[in-house]
Image (cartoon, helix red, strand yellow):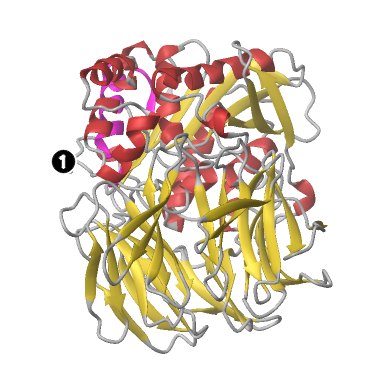
Amino acid sequence: MGPLRTLSTLIGLSFLSHPVFSEPETAWPYAADIPASQTLDVGLAGEQPVDIARFLLARGASQSSINSTGNQMAFVDNVTGRRQLWIKNLPDGQAKQLTWGNGISFYAWHPDGQRLIYGADNNGDEREAFFILNADGLKEKVLLPYSDGFRSFGSFSNDGEKFTYASTERNGRDFDIYLHDMKTGENKMIFQAEFGYFPQAWRPGSDEIIVTETRGEDAEDVYMLSAESGELRPLFRPDVAAAFSEFHWTDDGSKLYFVSNLNREMKAIFAYDPASKKTKQVIGSQFDIDDFIVCGQDSMLLWTENRDGIDTLLKKPVGSIETSEIPLPDGDYSISCTKNSANVLVSINSATSPGEVYLIDAQSRQQTVVYRAEMAGISRKNLVNPVQVSFPARDGVTLHGQLYMPKGREGQAPVVIDVHGGPTSQAKLGWQPLTQYLVGKGIAVLDINVRGSTGYGKTFTRLDNQEKRLDSVRDLVDALTWMKTDKRLDANNAAVMGGSYGGYMVNAVMGKYPDAFKAGASFVGVSDWVRALKSASPALMASDRIEYGDIREQKWQDFYAVNSPINTVNDIKAPMFYEHGANDPRDPVTESDRMVKILRDKNIPVTYLRFPDEGHGVSKLENRIIFYRELAAFLEQHLKTQ
């Protein structure tokens, strides 16, 4: 059900790539499940263990990017308790907040480098309005007002006079492609779609736009669309589905760079020549290439390699055979540059930082920290970096993860397995407030990558498709088997938690293997696959038919009628924790409601947080503090700790 890496991502905004549609909200009879405001208590600076609120109040820059002139960076910060857009003059200007409303969902620089487009929804309903805002924060305009449709921003034309986006406004289901004229305000549908089509990079000097069509959870087909005629011409529709992303045209429009695992296991950089219609691999690796940019008037290629969940930044001059690494602290990187200089902006999210930003000269490799994280009185020396682990499942498949161990603990540690969403996503090195709190309390955390995760090759990602769905659920139990061989861990004293698809995994494993875990915690998770797949948008249906099977066929209705968690809920024995937003447009709140009601009827202990002002994730700071504090208390209560 779309990408969610870890619990820390859940606490931000939503994380499915395309929405499903919620069921009508009904009154919830248990008033105690509706969270009430709480007095903020952060404990004392230097106090050990650190209070959970301080980990939430620590903040950093996310989604940072540099403007076209190279003199400013924009980024997202939640210091106000909402995700807001900020700007900073480079290299050493003071950060300035630009947006002040209910929080933003995305932003992008206008090609002139003096304005920014951003989107915002209402309390997590994911139905965005689009706005254009001057970089000085003094002038703002509504481009697309709120509607009942879902939208996905595409890209600006090179002159900045138009931009593309996909929207379900026509019928509430299909993602058509639209063109917005910045001068006239006119919106024009330029392609009527079935299922999900999404605009990407605009070819310089032409009306041609790269468009992708959803093909499975981890793949796309690629087309060229004429904005003038509406003609859609296929570029890549491989027999074996492949991922395509990071599209970059050269300035003259003569070459298209992109990242793909076309005809290979791991993602590489390719170049397509539209004149000859030939494609060649430019850069390959034994690891996935994730982020990729073209800088310095098309003279420099920079990219990140995902080495078992930890990024490495590399560069290569165009036309050279020399590739070199730019050394940086370990973490999860995002990169941005300008077309006219060698300056590169690198955001780093790590186990010891919620987000710092480096400005790097790619030629000289000179580095300047232009944004430092605010740690809310937490000493980094007390934080834990994970160790990378791999171990076999019972059928021989190698599983992976990041293991966080408590410092100085004697004896075996209780453990929490954290399951990412997606399922096509990956547990990577990053800032995880709850994980750091738990290890401070003596509880180990395994951030696991079961089969179906990305980052370990195309084959591994597709090992959980269709009938193999429950093999990934079984991987969680096999992780406990491996833990029994590690004297540091108490596999008989373990809990499991996860959000979105990870929430489904928790629901499933607690019912199918009821004696494996002492407790389970599920957030915005699916409980009934028949309902979820039948009510999915066509964009999701296009991917679901490959990932889960075509629910229109009786075969798959029968399969999920048996194998949905709602049908094994009566087998759950252990205490459960649930969280769901009443405005969730993807997995409706009734998915958790039904599980909670059945478990309570069985007298199974259940803690339920049902937020009336959240959606598919917990975005507001006051709600995040309640969520984390209650979840941490639940896990501590049901795991034996020293």
* Residue at the spot 32% in from the left edge and 13% down from the top edge: 570
Q: Which quadrant of the view contains residue 157? A: bottom left
Determine if the magenta segment contains residue 596.
yes
* Residue at the spot 84% in from the left edge and 72% down from the top edge: 364
Residue placed under numbered mark 1 in the picture: 26
**Residue 34 drawn at (x, y percent):** 30, 43
Left or right: where 30 falls relative to 402 = left
**Location of residue 66 with respect to 632 vertically, above or below:** below
**Residue 180 drawn at (x, y percent):** 29, 75
**Residue 63 drawn at (x, y percent):** 55, 63
* Residue at the spot 47% in from the left edge and 46% down from the top edge: 10
Query: Which residue range is magenta in the image?
Result: 584-606
Q: Report the amino acid beneath label 1.
A: Thr
Left or right: where 299 falls relative to 260 = right
User: How many numbered badges does the structure rendering display?
Assistant: 1
**Location of residue 110 with respect to 475 vertically, above or below:** below
**Quadrant of image for the C terminus:** top right
